[in-house]
Image (tube, rainbow, N blue to C red):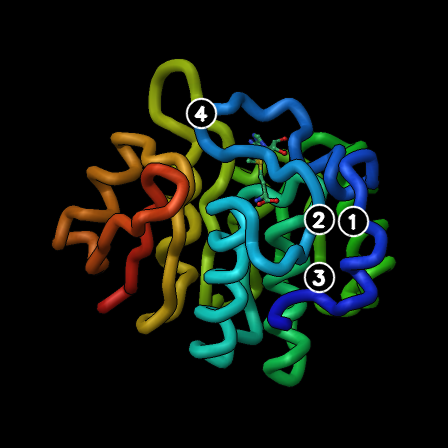
Amino acid sequence: MIGPTARFKTYASTPSSRASKARGSGRPAAGRAAPSTAVIPTPMPSRAFRFIELIYLLCRGLRATRVAEFATSVGMSTLYFAAAIRDNGGGTVIGSEIVPAKVETAKRNLAEAGLADYAEIREGDARKTLRDLGGPVDFVLIDGWPGESGPSLAREVIGIVAPQLRVGGYVMNDNAEPDYLDFIRDPKNGFVSMTLPLKGGTELSLKLR
Ligand SMILES: C[S@@+](CC[C@H](N)C(=O)[O-])C[C@H]1O[C@@H](n2cnc3c(N)ncnc32)[C@H](O)[C@@H]1O
């Protein structure tokens, strides 16, 4: 098994479990199908789980010790980042979440999985809380909600975190916001990028310079 510990699996085994309920917490259906049951089921029942497994695999391959995510919600992706960091020997995932109740749930989920030592969840608007990551990061997840108008949050956040991503690091985006894609696919911004056949448009980009 990859990802968070087998212990975490135990409290996610019913549709009414905390993690399962929280995973589908109000997000519009467009971006991701909410899983109906376990957190680490075998075999994986939905493409959403393959997405967070991929996070784990890429972070292990990078030997990642510092990563950042926009956003955390209740901590599903955070758990996989934290597990990879633990398995790489230690470090921190810096999460961001604007809804205080979600921050509390994410912290509880991390604690119950034994991964709290590998995560720092910053409460507030990611456009502020991710401005200073305290040094280069190996991986960034851009998984917020698409905005209604104006520049997308994804586009704003990538502008803030791209300079803090190390060369050779990855950024993954989940919602295919058009202005985000314009940025990340423009060669002058230093990334090489591809769309993965996951969830209808997960964009994975490697920082070249
Ligand atoms: C799709 S969810 C994140 C899911 C998470 N990455 C995972 O895989 O478990 C998007 C989250 O972005 C949060 N959010 C929206 N706008 C935000 C902002 N400006 N700053 C921080 N978080 C924000 C929402 O509250 C929501 O929990």
Question: Residue shown at 46%/56% (left/top)?
Answer: 140
> Reading the chain from its start, which is encountered first: label 1 or label 3?
1
Q: Which secondary structure lies at badge 1?
A: loop
User: How far apart, in angstroms, are the residues tagged by discs 3 and 4?
Assistant: 28 Å
38 left or right of 47 in image = right
User: How far apart, in angstroms, are the residues tagged by discs 2 and 3?
Assistant: 22 Å
Res 30 label: 4
Question: Residue shown at 53%/55% (left/top)?
Answer: 52
Q: Which secondary structure lies at badge 3?
A: strand
Residue 55, given in percent of the width and then of the height, sits at: 49, 61
**Mark 4 near mark 1, Cβ–Cβ under 8 Å?**
no
Q: Nearer the viewer, residue 56 or 104?
A: 56
Question: Residue shown at 37%/63% (left/top)?
Answer: 170
Q: Quadrant location of the C terminus?
A: bottom left
> Reading the chain from its start, which is encountered first: label 4 or label 1?
1
Q: Amino acid at mark 3?
A: Ala
115 left or right of 31 in image = right
Q: Amino acid at mark 1?
A: Ala
The residue that disc 3 covers is 119
Q: Amino acid at mark 2?
A: Ala
The residue that disc 1 covers is 12
